[in-house]
Image (cartoon, grey):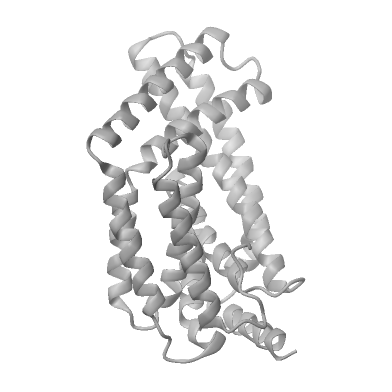
């Protein structure tokens, strides 16, 4: 069953069911024979993001303890980010060969891929030796246990309204900051914010509703901004390669090419998501909750 509460399912029951499901998926991923393969890391991070999306909704109902537990989980799971960045760099390197076949020489591509593979082995070995995965399990259990005990002060969809409005405000502010400053880190943060809002819309949206359409729209924007971030990660890897092997990469040319591509991706994401993120948060969530209540009344 996907990450979704049926319109005729009690909200609290549905949240508990999904928290249990994602908690089990995350713990199962940690206990695999090979928990740090590229696919396993990606799957684990997705479950953790869904758990955090539920927590952010619940936290706004005066639940400071949930916020502390979520932040603890974020810190613990941060050990996965460098491994994921290496995987992203390798995936993007392969795609670049198709989209920009003359940008990197075969020697450059092969050398960088070997360097990234070695870097990944070092990171994975360190994760096992330092028992970093064991440190993630306890925060997962603690946050999920707290979420299962959480009870909103108001029942039904109304109890989730403050959290939804908070997530929309964060996405709205992040878009404004990205447009004002235009830095890669700002667009990356905007991607995180709309990704959380997307998960929350998917969680609640009735079939064929505007909320479901908005979730799809945000999913497209997340993908575009993800492709932008992938170029940033690959650029960093190429710069490090140039430092140890001068002359192997025309880094200035690479930066120019990737900058043009990033600008196009960011513009497209902004055009797609602007309608959702530019609307005043209270008005957007009020319209959303009215749609959810109508779906539950039928």
Q: Position of residue 128 (x, y in %)?
A: 29, 35
Quadrant (top left/top right/bottom left/bottom right) for the C terminus: bottom right
Q: Quadrant of residue 24?
A: bottom left
Q: Is residue 185 rendered to the left or right of residue 253? A: left
Q: Is residue 99 rendered to the left or right of residue 257? A: right
Q: Is residue 156 rendered to the left or right of residue 287? A: left
Q: Nearer the viewer, residue 163 or 225?
A: 163
- Which residue sits at x=56%, y=10%? 105
- Which residue sits at x=27%, y=32%? 126
Q: Position of residue 200 (x, y in %)?
A: 55, 68
Quadrant (top left/top right/bottom left/bottom right) for the N terminus: bottom right
**Residue 128 visible in the current orientation:** yes
**Residue 181 visible in the current orientation:** no
For residue 22, above or below residue 183: below
Q: Quadrant of residue 71?
A: bottom left
Q: Position of residue 61 (x, y in %)?
A: 39, 83
């Amino acid at each position: 069953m996907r990450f979704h509460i049926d319109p005729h399912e009690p909200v609290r029951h549905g949240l508990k069911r999904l928290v249990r499901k994602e908690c089990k998926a995350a713990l199962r991923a940690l206990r695999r024979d090979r928990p740090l393969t590229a696919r396993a890391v990606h799957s684990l991070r997705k479950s953790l993001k869904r758990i955090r999306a539920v927590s952010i909704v619940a936290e706004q109902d005066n639940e400071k303890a949930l916020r502390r537990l979520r932040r603890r989980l974020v810190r613990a799971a941060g050990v996965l980010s460098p491994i994921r960045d290496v995987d992203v760099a390798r995936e993007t390197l392969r795609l670049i060969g198709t989209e920009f076949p003359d940008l990197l020489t075969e020697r450059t591509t092969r050398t960088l891929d070997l360097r990234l593979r070695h870097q990944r082995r070092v990171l994975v070995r360190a994760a096992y030796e330092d028992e970093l995965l064991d440190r993630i399990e306890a925060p997962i259990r603690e946050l999920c246990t707290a979420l299962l005990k959480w009870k909103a002060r108001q029942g039904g969809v109304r109890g989730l309204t403050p959290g939804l409005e908070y997530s929309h405000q964060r996405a709205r502010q992040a878009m404004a900051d990205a447009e004002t400053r235009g830095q890669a880190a700002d667009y990356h943060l905007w991607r995180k914010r709309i990704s959380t809002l997307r998960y929350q819309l998917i969680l609640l949206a009735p079939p064929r509703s505007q909320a479901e359409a908005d979730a799809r729209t945000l999913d497209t924007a997340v993908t575009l901004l993800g492709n932008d971030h992938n170029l940033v990660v690959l650029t960093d890897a190429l710069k490090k390669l140039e430092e140890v092997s001068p002359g192997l990469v025309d880094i200035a040319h690479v930066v120019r090419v990737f900058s043009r591509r990033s600008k196009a991706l960011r513009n497209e994401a902004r055009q797609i998501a602007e309608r959702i993120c530019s609307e005043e948060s209270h008005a957007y969530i009020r319209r959303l909750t009215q749609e959810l209540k109508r779906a539950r009344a039928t």
